[in-house]
């Protein structure tokens, strides 16, 4: 398992954040996704044998979020 932290610009509204967490958690290879609305931090634990960091970032982008990191 690997852990990554991504900082997002658009983490101000609760509903989009819940949608992002749900989308990430239903993705094969992602074990955990936690979003901290106060600082825009997303912590993701994933299985590097099932999914790449680039694919995780693409999944976040598909949900309409933009990474700062």
Image: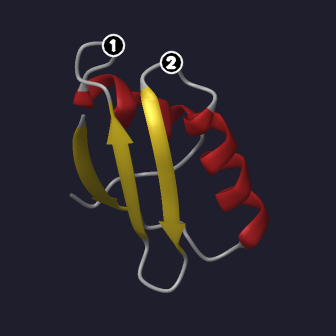
Name the residue rendered at 48%, 30% in the picture: 59
Could you say which quadrant of the image residue 63 lies in? top right
Q: Element at badge 2?
A: loop
Mark with earlier residue (1, 2)? 2
Q: Residues within 10 Å of mark 2 (few under 14, many from 20)?
A: few
**Residue 21, placed above or below residue 15:** above
Say which residue label 1 marks.
Answer: 50
Task: Say left or right for 26 vs 31.
Answer: right
Name the spot of residue 17 as percent of width and height, x first.
Answer: 65, 60
**Residue 59, placed above or below residue 5:** above
Task: Say which of 34 and 57 sits in front.
Answer: 34
Q: Element at badge 1?
A: loop
The colour mode here is secondary structure
Q: Which residue of the protein is positioned furthest toward the right in this rendering?
A: 15
Task: Say left or right for 63 vs 55.
Answer: right
Name the spot of residue 24 as percent of width and height, x first.
Answer: 55, 37
Task: Say left or right for 25 vs 6.
Answer: right
Tell how many labels.
2
Image quadrant holding the C terminus, namely bottom left
Task: Say which of 13 and 32 sits in front.
Answer: 32
Name the residue rendered at 62%, 47% in the picture: 20
**Residue 3, placed above or below residue 51:** below
Name the residue rendered at 78%, 62% in the picture: 15
The CA distance from mark 1 to mark 2 is: 7 Å
Say which residue label 2 marks.
Answer: 28
Image quadrant holding the N terminus, namely top left
Would you say the residues marked 1 and 2 are in contact, meaning their CB atoms lie under 8 Å apart?
yes
Name the spot of residue 23 as percent of width and height, x first.
Answer: 64, 35
Q: Which residue of the protein is positioned furthest toward the top in this rendering?
A: 50
Name the residue rendered at 46%, 36% in the picture: 31
């Amino acid at each position: 398992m690997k852990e990554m932290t991504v900082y997002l610009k658009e983490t101000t509204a609760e509903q989009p954040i819940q949608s992002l967490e749900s989308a990430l958690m239903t993705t094969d290879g992602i074990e955990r996704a936690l979003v901290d609305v106060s600082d825009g931090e997303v912590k993701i634990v994933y299985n590097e044998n099932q999914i790449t960091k680039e694919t995780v970032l693409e999944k976040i982008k598909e949900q309409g979020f933009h990474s700062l990191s």
